[in-house]
Amino acid sequence: MSRVDIPRAELEAVLERYNGCLTRTAAHLSEHGHAITKEGLRKKCKRMGVAYNRSFANYDHLPKLRAAHDEFPTYDRFERVTGDALVVSDLHCPFFSPEWVGRALEVAKAQRIRQVVIAGDVLDGKSVSSWKCQDRGHTLQMEFTAARQLLMAFLERFDAVYLLTGNHDERVARFTDNQFDLAFLYQHIVPDQKLKVSDYAWCMVGSDIRVTHPYNYSSVPGAVPRALASKYHQHIIMGHTHRYAYTFDPSGRYVACEIGGLFDASKMDWQMLKDNRAPMWNNGFAMVKDGDIVGFHEGTHWEVWI
Ligand SMILES: [Mn+2]
């Protein structure tokens, strides 16, 4: 067969059809009037600057495997918040602290912050906990009612309220055997388009600040956010530990901050009825403003900020 030049567009189309596989592309071309060997095709591709797959794409079953695998979701739909934001966490409705919620809202107002990320544990879920509930009269309805009042106060102040999933919120989903997700639940507690509920326990603020309610706990202040900052190469603002610490990861490049929370510890039986040797809980929250992370805690001079 005479040597016929293959138009570039045709070559690229056939390569794409075979996932860049040189063997199968060469076979196809040979069957369709362009006799060429695999090696010849490789040289031609290099000469023409046409991309082909050099490795495992030659595996015949790849398209089928890819289709089987593509059926399942890729977990990349976390919230991406742009601009300044307040970050609060651990409200444990109905056991939030009105004073600390007030401080957070006042700082946001004075600093003209129009968005808030609530980094998990809006609900306490004590009546559906696997731990023994000391208060038999406590119900989920009480928690939902308090959450409604609380979220309405946030929705009044902010243009957007991002809500991340905490382990205590998961208690409620787990109790119902995940018959509904938290977004569905909150749509019924407070129907408002400004409320954005994520089934992720983390989100990004800007390109390099990770706000999270992590799986891990450590009794060493700063230990968990330092580890996360080193792992993800991002600044970390986190809830969950109910303790305030502001430090840096070992590289010194990333902020590692635990923000405490807006809970009222004196209302929580599992903290108050029995002693434990975990560090004392602290209240606090954070603000991201112009890319800077500012922490607010029990020692903050409020007159500077409000
Ligand atoms: Mn919590």
Image (cartoon, rainbow, N blue to C red):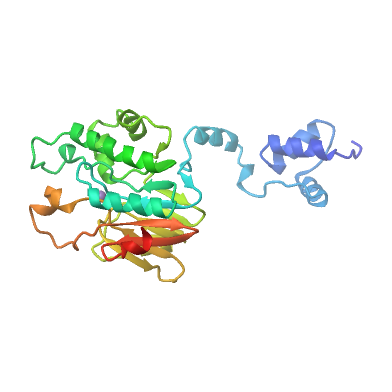
Left or right of residue 232, residue 145 in this image: left
Give the residue drawn at x 41%, y 64%: 255
Residue 127, quarter of picture: top left
Residue 123 as seen in the image, left or right of residue 74: left
Q: Position of residue 250 (x, y in %)?
A: 40, 71
Question: Tag count in the figure?
Answer: 0
Q: Vertical placement of 115 versus 238: above or below?
A: above
Residue at the limit of the structure toward the right, as seen here: 2
Is 200 on the left or on the right of 66, as rendered? left
* Of 303 and 15, the residue lying toward us: 303
Residue at image coords 25%, 56%: 242
The quadrant of the rendering that contains the N terminus is: top right
**Where is residue 28 drawn, in percent x and y?**
75, 34
Note whether 36 is above or below 109 in the view shown. above
Please provide percent x and percent y for residue 36: 81, 41
Residue 43 visible to an observer of this rendering: yes
Residue 27 seen from this side: no
Quadrant (top left, top right, bottom left, bottom right) of the C terminus: bottom left
At horizontal 46% and vertical 44% (from top left) the residue drawn is: 79
| Frontmost residue, 275 versus 228 | 275
Q: Residue 92: x and y, percent? A: 23, 45
